[in-house]
């Protein structure tokens, strides 16, 4: 079994990798690069699985009790927690970007629907616009 210091160092490295990935995700969101976002999402999921596995290894390590009593380990844990907090902050910023992008896409979609056939524009139960393509197609004058 690896030493607890090696496990913490590995976790720190993985979290730094996650931070870089989240920063790349922000760039892809701003550039609206769907292909890049899909690749990054896959990489992010794999990295999060690795981080979770290391976390389990750390909690099951025989020396895990020293994490709160050994000053050297406490310092390593604190530095790693700081990187985790940065990841959470960056991820929250990306979530806001995603929400804004989705709202913009929704407004654009509604505008396209309205311009496609204004006479068939209707509203659903949630107040969103939609077009009914069969509206008026059965009229015989």
Image (cartoon, rainbow, N blue to C red):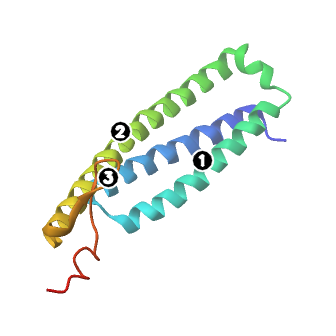
- Closer to viewer: mark 3 or mark 2: 3
- In this rendering, the answer to whether 10 lies above or below 123 is above
- Closer to viewer: mark 2 or mark 1: 2
The crowding category of the residue bearing disc 3, from other C-alpha atoms within 10 Å (few below 14, some 14 to 19, many at least 20), is few
Residue lying at 66% horizontally and 49% vertically, measured from the top left: 50
Gap between marks 3 and 2 measured at Cα: 14 Å
Residue located beneath label 3 in the image:
102
Gap between marks 1 and 3 measured at Cα: 24 Å
- Which mark is first along the chain, 1 or 2? 1
- Which mark is first along the chain, 2 or 3? 2
- In this rendering, the answer to whether 83 lies above or below 94 is above
Residue located beneath label 1 in the image:
48
For the residue pair 65 and 125, the one nearer the viewer reads as 125
Picture coordinates of residue 56, whole percent (x, y): 75, 38
Question: Is 102 placed left or right of 118 in the picture?
Answer: right
Residue located beneath label 2 in the image:
93
Q: Decide: marks 1, 3 in contact (CB < 8 A)?
A: no
């Amino acid at each position: 079994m690896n030493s607890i210091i090696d496990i913490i160092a590995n976790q720190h490295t993985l979290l730094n990798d996650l931070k870089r990935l989240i920063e790349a995700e922000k760039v892809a969101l701003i550039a609206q690069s769907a292909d890049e976002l899909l690749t990054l999402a896959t990489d992010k999921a794999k990295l999060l699985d690795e981080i979770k596995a290391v976390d389990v290894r750390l909690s099951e390590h025989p020396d895990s009790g020293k994490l709160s009593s050994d000053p050297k380990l406490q310092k390593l844990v604190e530095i790693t927690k700081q990187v985790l907090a940065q990841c959470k902050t960056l991820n929250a910023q990306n979530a806001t970007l995603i929400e804004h992008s989705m709202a913009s896409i929704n407004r654009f979609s509604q505008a396209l629907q309205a311009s496609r056939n204004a006479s068939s524009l209707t509203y659903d139960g949630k107040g969103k616009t939609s077009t009914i393509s069969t509206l008026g197609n059965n009229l015989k004058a």
